Amino acid sequence: MIQQHLSILLVVIPLLAAPIVAMLRGSRLPWLLTLLITWVCFALAGIQLWTVATHGTISYELGGWEPPWGIEYRIDALNAFIALIVAGIAALTMSYAFRSVEKEIRSEKTPLFYTAFLLCMTGLLGITQTGDAFNVFVFLEISSLSTYALISMGRDRRALTAAFSYLIMGTIGATFFLIGVGLLYSVTGTLNMVDLAERIPQVSSMRTLHTAFAFIVVGVSLKLALFPLHLWLPNAYTFAPSIVTVFIAATSTKVAIYVLARFIFTVFGADFAFGVMPTTWLLVPLAIIGLLSASAVAIGQNKIKRMLAYSSVAQIGYMVLGIGMATSAGLTAALLHVFNHALMKAALFMALGAVFYRFGSVYLDDMRGLGKRMPWTMGAFVAGGLSLIGVPLTVGFISKWHLILAAIELGWWPVVVAIVVGSLLAIVYIWRVVEVAYFQEGKSNERCEAPLSMLVPMWALVGANIWFGVDTRLTVGMAQHAAQLLMGVSP
Amino acid sequence: MTELIFGHYNYWIVIFLMMTGFYTVISRGNLIKKIAGLNIFQASVFLMYITMGNVKGGTTPIIAEGFEVYSNPLNHVLILTAIVVGVATTAVGLALSVRIKEAYGTIEEDEIHAQDESL
């Protein structure tokens, strides 16, 4: 019975758990229930991935209504992959969360915090599961609204203005997406993604369709923080509570990348998106400018959280670059980087969260001598940083390698140079932290390590970083399978 | 020419409202005005969906005796969902404005920036 309703359970379970958690009191019970729910969802996502790998695409009709009249939850290799990432990061984040939330969130608000977290997870999983274009908008707004609430719970009052400007920009982006879906519906008469894919080639010369494509791409680009639509990201990541930054840095932009890939390749088809519309000329230059400028700005930051936020904008540039290449190799590299970046950034922000837990500050100057005082935490930071740079034996190397291979396959040598320069810039900003932590003397030398509940998930992620950097069959296989599926579906 | 302007007057209204709302969001510094602009912007999108769904000679999409042609009901359903989303966004935005007023003492964007810059 569970197997049959797997795809809807992934969305319904956190949704139903959210009001239950809101009614609980204290700080331990809400956390325990949320922890249970996230691990259950992780297990379900794993079963779903296995089911898709063995039985092919899952098609689930909501309420028994046949598509295209009813809403369809359509899970193929790409969906299942992204859903696993979201559920996995949520499970690890919740395992890490208890101490961090105790310190940073006001105690009377703790149950509401966990409620908003569950709603955010519902929204993100709903986006990955659905096969209906309007349903994507609904879940996109569910996840966005809960993210605004989560960010505003930060201690610094600038968290409020960061959440407000994210609200304004995010709603504009989602409304652009809504306009695009409306225009799509007006020319094709359907909202189901597979049905749209069949009907779009017949109307591909209509200007309404081109406008719909433009609105959808711009709306989603705002959500995934493509340069120059990334202005909400640095403030939102910096002033949010540490645990919120861990979760949204590793999931929300990745899901937006999934939506972009889904609409460009499955709904509109690569022939239309890259043949009729100049999408490559939009995505690739913006991606390159984004990755170079964001890496450069990251170097100048003194607040490490902000530095990693700009680094996230740069990494998103890499992913969009892979999508813009419009080849199977480029798409494989982009999907690999989605998985790898989730692992890297979650580990890095978890390490920062542990530093904040012990010292209450994430400024560079306050991190002097931390290498001796928090060896395990800074070790995790260094491992994540090496992955960000793309050192061999880490997962970051694998995705950068595939991206360079894809660029060479197309003969785009300037792009290869840009990717390598991006890595060099990453070396500079990671080295700044390593130098201060390991080579400068702090005020005291006593050991002040993070609690075990924070160290274990952090090092689980670091271990995954290194494991998937050495044994790449699983991730590269999944990414290649998903990429071929996306390229093959296009007419 | 007249066909372009008067035949499609509903779409011209949508465009006018959309640009008004969008311009208000960008140009006004008061947080409440930004939220109001966002609402106008979203309302124009709702209007676009609903006018798209109207069928010439069609009646309200409720089954009744003696009527053959109905307007498209799906657009109305989509817009109900989108209106709820809009209301929720407005609620969160206004709640944030209240908290910002408590924390900063003002809801003018430039004064908030000035207070943050001085840190």
Image (cartoon, coloured by chain):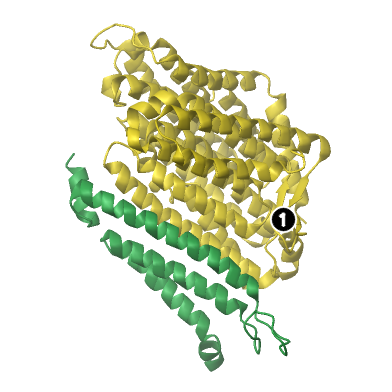
Vertical order, A83 against B41 (above or below)? above
Query: Residue A4 sits in which quadrant?
Result: top right
The colour with which the image depicts chain B is: green
The one of A184 and A63 positioned closer to us in this rendering: A63
What residue is disc 1 on? A63
Q: What residue sits 39% from the left and 26% below the top?
A: A100
Q: Is mark 1 on a helix, strand or loop?
A: helix
Q: Which residue lies furthest to the top in this view?
A: A446
Q: What residue sits 55% from the left and 19% below the top?
A: A460
- x, y (%) of residue A471? 68, 20
The quadrant of the picture occupied by the N terminus of chain A is top right
Question: Position of A259 compared to B110: left or right?
Answer: right
- Chain shaded yellow: A
Vertical order, A477 against A372 (above or below)? below
The quadrant of the picture occupied by the C terminus of chain A is bottom right
Question: Position of A66 compared to A396: left or right?
Answer: right
Chain letter behind tag 1: A
